[in-house]
Image (tube, rainbow, N blue to C red):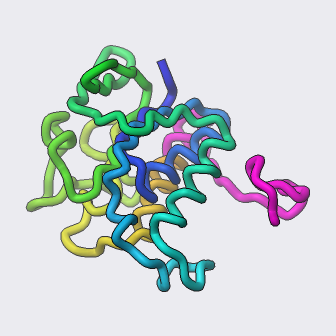
């Protein structure tokens, strides 16, 4: 059993995985590589002047992998369900159970619907912490917005979900804030060069 099961390997899912794993929770990501980032070129992502979406995604994957996230590349989640201890995510070959669930499947809301999440119109209903009506299940990115589909917004949603999970686990508001001394020439095992 893992702490956080994440369905989706775009900016939201990988950011949730990064924040969770970096701060002591085990994260497993189902990543089919179906993200819209492969069609994007980033001119509007803070801190990035101009970068191909696929190149950005590869850098994000390397960062997530450097923290030891269990990233199931090419594995599609086919179903999600609640269990006595949290959630089960099924694929054709396996099932993974976790205490928390983060859905980061773009505009595809099928898993949220099968889980029984409440909707507001056509989008999954969440609060600012990205938690759905199903306790400890989170929805992010395009599935919670009618039209505001941006990589930076999705990454923020993933961060918000992970920070709320960390706050629940720590029993107080948790903040992921690094200072230069934390990096000491290396950020998450990646060289600063």
Tell me the residue at 75%/53% (across/down): 190
Residue 131 showing in the rendered view: no
> Residue at the spot x=24%, y=25% of the render?
81
Closer-to-camera residue (27/130): 27
- Left or right of 98, for residue 93: left
Q: Position of residue 78 (x, y in %)?
A: 22, 32
In which quadrant of the rendered view does residue 179 lie?
A: bottom right
Tell whether position 191 is magenta.
yes
* Magenta region includes residue 141: no
How many marks overall? 0
Query: 32 above or below 178?
Result: above
Rendered view: 99 above or below 42: above
Tell me residue 155's x, y (percent).
Answer: 47, 62
Residue at x-position 22% and y-position 74%: 147
Q: Is residue 141 left or right of residue 171?
A: left
Q: Residue furthest top?
A: 84
Residue 176, how many percent across, how many down? Answer: 67, 54
State the quadrant of the C terminus.
bottom right
Q: Which residues are magenta?
A: 164-193
Q: Quadrant of residue 166?
A: top right
The one nearer the camera, 160 or 18, is: 18
Q: Is residue 164 above or below residue 26?
A: below
Residue 139 shown left or right of residue 51 in the figure: left
Q: Is residue 188 visible?
A: yes
Residue drawn at x 40%, y 63% is 154
């Amino acid at each position: 059993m893992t702490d956080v099961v994440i369905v989706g390997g775009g900016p939201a899912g990988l950011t949730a995985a990064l924040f969770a794993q970096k701060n002591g929770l085990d994260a497993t990501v189902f990543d089919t590589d179906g993200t819209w980032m492969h069609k994007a070129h980033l001119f509007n992502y803070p801190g990035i002047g101009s970068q191909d979406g696929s190149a950005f995604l590869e850098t994000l994957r390397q960062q997530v992998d450097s923290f030891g996230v269990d990233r199931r590349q090419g594995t599609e989640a086919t179903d999600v369900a609640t269990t006595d201890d949290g959630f089960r995510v099924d694929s054709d070959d396996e099932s993974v159970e976790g205490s928390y669930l983060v859905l980061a499947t773009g505009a595809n809301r099928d898993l949220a619907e099968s889980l029984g999440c409440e909707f507001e119109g056509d989008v999954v209903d969440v609060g600012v912490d990205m938690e759905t009506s199903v306790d400890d299940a989170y929805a992010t990115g395009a599935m919670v917005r009618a039209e505001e589909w941006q990589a930076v917004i999705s990454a923020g949603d993933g961060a918000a979900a992970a920070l709320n999970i960390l706050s629940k686990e720590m029993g107080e508001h948790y903040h992921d804030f690094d200072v230069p001394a934390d990096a000491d020439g290396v950020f998450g095992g990646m060289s600063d060069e």
